[in-house]
Amino acid sequence: VQLEEAGGGLVQTGGSLRLSCTAFGDIVSVENMAWFRQAPGKEREFVARITWNSAVTTYADSVSGRFAISRDTAKNTMWLQMYDLNPEDTGVYYCTIGLTFTPGYQYWGQGTQVTVTS
């Protein structure tokens, strides 16, 4: 399984970006897909998650109300729409897949850089 992220870039405070993540390979028993991010000098942190079948979403407090996660199971693709970005949102954004009956996340993308300037 390979995950490919796209859509990162440079944006000013208050701007928007839309990230995508497409899964390639033998995708079976996907429980959920999620986005994490890692800022320079900080640990990787959870951003948002969506369950694959029922599309139930969960967000970190820091992005709730500003970010929206969605997915299309037919395209094996997930998106993260980000609004009202601020410099604290800067970091490398990673998508990941969690499989059914398996704790944690098993596959990770290479990451896409998001930089928000003040």
Image (spheres, rainbow, N blue to C red):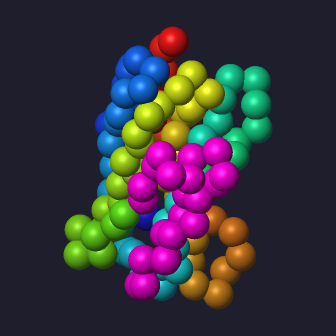
Residue 106 x/y as whole percent: 60, 65
Image point (57%, 22%), residue name:
87
**Is residue 68 within the magenta segment?**
yes
Total label count? 0
Residue 33 x/y as whole percent: 49, 66
Residue nearest the viewer, comparing 24 with 88: 88
Q: Would you say 77 lies left or right of 50 here?
A: left
Q: Residue furthest left?
A: 74
Image point (56%, 53%), residue name:
64
Residue nearest the viewer, comparing 20 with 11: 11
**Is residue 88 within the magenta segment?**
no
Residue 68 x/y as whole percent: 42, 55
Q: Would you say 57 lies left or right of 43 here?
A: left
Residue 50 x/y as whole percent: 49, 69
Region of the chain picked out in magenta, as a range: 48-69
- Does residue 69 sit above or below 15 in this rendering? below
Q: Is residue 49 visible?
A: yes
- Does residue 103 sit above or below 77 in this rendering? below
Q: Is residue 23 visible?
A: no
Image point (33%, 42%), residue name:
18
Image point (69%, 69%), residue name:
104
Position of the N terminus, as image quadrant, is bottom left
Residue nearest the viewer, comparing 25 with 118: 118
Residue 78 position by quadrant: bottom left
- Does residue 104 sit above or below 99 in this rendering? above
Q: Would you say 49 lies left or right of 21 here?
A: right
- Does residue 46 sit above or below 56 in this rendering? above
